[in-house]
């Protein structure tokens, strides 16, 4: 794959995945506002429409699209991601100053979705500047980011399940603890940089995380199916259950790519898009 093709492929892949995620965040935030918060509801609906349009256009482009068109598209999407990030931080400020009493968006959930928006806009910026992180740094940084995201998901699931679903709540709590531990382990590895960036250590780190993410991914899948079939008691929107499942799949996909890059000697460095 030529470098420009890789740029187009990687940009479209990121935008297709994250624009759908941003669209869904807008819906979740809207559902958590009180009915009198008409201005916030209108803003959330506007973001939903914006990202739906971006998602649609990202599917209309292909690998044959001119890289300069994609570069412009990336700028536009990055701008939209920056705006939704600012909106989420504004909402977080309102909640933390107790201006939205009775709303049902947890502060940690709002912070979480703002971190995802920030990740998205940074990635677009890196793509456009042609400055993706070197592999050994990306492995640590992506893990620190996604392990925290996974720990948050487990906690959200635990809090949105009905308390009477005792076994599932307990399982969610255990996953929350496991991913907190993994995240601290990743932070430890990060602070030992660059000495910690040996192939055996990084590959053990990736393998261990992969095992845990697979089991959390399966738990989310089971929960999503049970919610869809109305077999358990919760206030989890079926789309939210599917959303967190897809984010775990995304993390696994990234881990598998790291795994291949660390073990394969035939990987062309320039094609390592991280
Ligand atoms: Fe999300
Ligand atoms: Fe998430």
Image: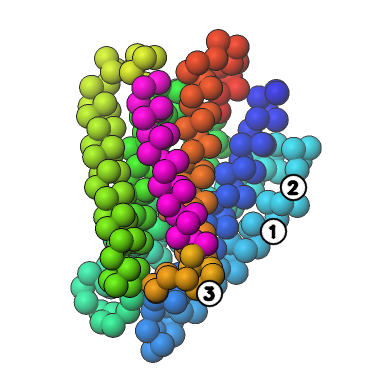
- The residue at the point 28 percent across, 65 percent down is 166
Which quarter shows the N terminus?
Answer: top right
Q: Does the magenta stretch include residue 221?
A: yes
- The residue at the point 36 percent across, 22 percent down is 204
Magenta: main secondary structure equals helix
Secondary structure beneath dot 1 equals helix
Most foreground residue, 248 or 224: 224
User: Counting residues from the N terminus, which is met first, the one under dot 2 or under dot 3?
Assistant: 3
Mark 1 lies on residue: 56
- Spatial distance from mark 2 to mark 3, Cα to Cα? 25 Å
Q: Does the magenta stretch include residue 68?
A: no
**Where residue 254 sits: x, y (%)?**
50, 35
Image check: 194 left or right of 143?
left
- Spatial distance from mark 2 to mark 1, Cα to Cα? 9 Å
**Where residue 42 sits: x, y (%)?**
49, 79
Query: Which quadrant of the frame does ligand 2 lie within?
Result: bottom left
Mark 1 burial class by Cα count in 10 Å: few <14, some 14-19, many 20+: few
Task: Please tell me in which quadrant of the rendered image residue 23 appears.
Answer: bottom right
- The residue at the point 45 percent across, 54 percent down is 220
**Where residue 56 sits: x, y (%)?**
69, 58
Mark 3 lies on residue: 45
**Where residue 206 sits: x, y (%)?**
40, 28
Furthest-right residue in this view: 64
Report the span colored magenta. 203-225
Mark 2 lies on residue: 61
Image check: 41 left or right of 76?
left
Q: Describe the colour scheme in one phrase.
A: rainbow
Please report contact status of discs 3 and 1: CB closer than 8 Å, yes or no: no
């Amino acid at each position: 794959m030529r470098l420009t093709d890789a740029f187009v492929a990687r940009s479209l892949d990121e935008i297709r995945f994250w624009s759908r995620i941003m669209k869904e965040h807008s819906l979740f935030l809207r559902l958590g506002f009180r009915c009198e918060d008409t201005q916030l509801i209108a803003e959330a609906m506007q973001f939903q429409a914006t990202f739906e349009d971006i998602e649609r256009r990202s599917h209309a482009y292909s690998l044959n699209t001119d890289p300069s068109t994609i570069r412009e598209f990336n700028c536009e999407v990055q701008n939209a991601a920056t705006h939704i990030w600012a909106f989420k931080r504004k909402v977080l400020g309102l909640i933390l100053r107790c201006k939205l009493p009775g709303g049902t968006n947890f502060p940690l959930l709002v912070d979480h979705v703002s971190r995802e928006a920030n990740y998205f806009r940074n990635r677009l910026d890196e793509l456009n500047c042609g400055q993706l992180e070197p592999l050994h740094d990306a492995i640590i940084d992506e893990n620190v980011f996604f392990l925290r995201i996974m720990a948050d998901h487990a906690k959200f699931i635990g809090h949105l399940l009905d308390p009477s679903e005792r076994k599932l709540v307990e399982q969610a709590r255990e996953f929350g603890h496991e991913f907190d531990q993994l995240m601290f382990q990743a932070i430890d590895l990060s602070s030992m940089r660059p000495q910690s960036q040996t192939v055996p250590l990084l590959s053990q780190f990736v393998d261990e995380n992969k095992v845990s993410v697979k089991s959390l991914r399966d738990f989310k899948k089971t929960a999503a199916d049970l919610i869809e079939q109305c077999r358990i008691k919760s206030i989890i929107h079926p789309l939210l259950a599917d959303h967190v499942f897809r984010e775990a799949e995304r993390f696994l996909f990234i881990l598998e790519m790291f795994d291949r890059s660390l073990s394969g000697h035939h990987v062309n460095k320039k094609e390592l898009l991280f």
